[in-house]
Image: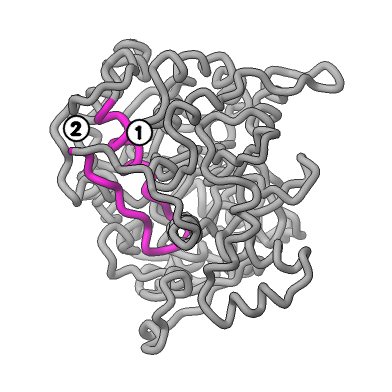
Amino acid sequence: MAAVPTDRHARTVVLPLLAVAAAILLQAPGPAAAETTAERGYRLLLTLPLVPPTLTEAEYFDLWQVWPEPQRAAAAAAPPAERRRMLLERYGFQETPDRPGPIPQQFTPDGKGNLSENCLSCHGGPVGGKVIRGLGNSLIDLATFYEDVAALRAARGIPAVPWPEGVPPPPESPVRGPNNAWGGAIALLLLRDRNADRTDTLQFPAPTPEQMFLPTKTPAFWLSKRKTRYYADAFIGKSHRDIMQFIASFAYSGEQIRALEEPFRDIYAWINAVGAPPYPGPVDPALVQRGRLVYLRDCVACHGIADSYPERVIPVAEVGTDPVRALDMPRDFKLHLGEGWFGMDGATPLYPDTGGYVAQPLDGVWATAPYLHNGSVPTMWDLLTPSERPKIWSRSDAGYDHARLGVEATAHAEMPADLTDPAERRRYYRTDLRGFGNQGHAYPPAGLPDADKRALIEFLKTL
């Protein structure tokens, strides 16, 4: 749910902290015509900077200057439009038709040459090459982006802003797609008291390195309307304040964060109004009907159907999927979040010990690959065939596998031995890494005949 999953800009931002804090804009340009609250929320994401500047527009368009060869030479020789495309591809960003200009949807400009990350950094993504509003961005590579920002600034003699003493820095994801939003949120709230005011005293025990790295796939916003609780383990009731934890920049005072509550009410309304995209291809009606019977027999008890959604949390011991996100998040953080301002001063329901993962609604499931909470399984066919799930795989950025229902992926026996560029290595999903395992979710336990898998996949296209 993170717009800015960590305070990464605190390590790289050019402006002094006071100037950064003063740069926030509390009003966005008005609409040309009347709009709903939800429409206003989406407009605010694209026009109202919600966090201090991440970088300048000029810096963004100059990032290619620190790329390794031969990418740098190719960018230098490319016309401007092609160079912009190369920037988007390297970082997993996208331009949006909903805001004119070449600024990626992941950033909001302030009109003064600065760019701030927004919720669409992780919650705006494409499927089959088409941008889908509110879709989790399975292409995002913020680790490479921030490495390049730091390298560009170092080359220009711009010092990084020191990281706060005593706060463990959250690691970036070694794989593109999943993010460590939770490591960032934990770091930010370590220095926020229960009124959301900035403090220099740790507010709960400093987490271990393992607790600071909780890789998670970004969920689609359109699932929110079906839920009463948020996140992969459903540990807290949903509210507009809860999602504001992800903008709690070290550079902001509590007053500045609280002043953004009204815009976030609108953003929250948009999140809960986003609709699931319909499957773009043809379906076989007879196969859909057969698949519906398979779904009602094997899937509906956990995932629900139509307006019936059980919001059932399945213990890790039962579902068998990678346990890191469900079991390693610090309980002290959950309590601090739920009992303070972000948790409506304790009024938001809190479930700190779920010990498992919520079975998600499957609205628009065709668009939400890769699957499982950590995005470790490229297609629905792979999910339904646990013994054949690839251990290492890469994907195309724009391809889509309609037969297997998921991203267009290639399995690999091992990592290429000569691949040393970190950005290129992140394009390979490695399920042997901590938090990235692809095990579990072996339902039904006895497996399905291939004919039933094909029918079930055809039915899932219609949800």
Q: Is residue 246 left or right of residue 29?
A: left
Q: Residue at x 47, y 62 (%)?
A: 155
* 262 relative to 357 in the view: left or right: right
User: Dot 1, how many residues are within 10 Å of its Cα: few (below 14), some (14-19), or many (20+)?
Assistant: many
| Callout 1 amino acid | Ala
From this view, report whether residue 99 is shown above or below residue 69: above
Position of residue 372 measured from the top left corner of the image (x, y, whole percent): 41, 54
Question: Which of the two marks, 1 or 2, is nearer to us in this view?
Answer: 2
Q: Position of residue 128 (x, y in %)?
A: 68, 62
Q: Quadrant of residue 200?
A: top left
Answer left or right for 378 relative to 353. Answer: right
Q: Nearer the viewer, residue 277 or 258?
A: 258
**What secondary structure do most residues of the magenta stretch adopt?**
loop
Percent of width and height locating residue 385: 42, 69
Which residue is tagged 2? Answer: 331
Name the residue: 73% across, 59% down: 283
Q: Amino acid at mark 2?
A: Arg
Q: Which residues are magenta?
A: 166-191
Q: Name the spot of residue 174 as percent of width and height, x first.
A: 37, 63
Is 21 located above or below residue 318 in the figure?
above
Which residue is labeled 1 in the image? 234
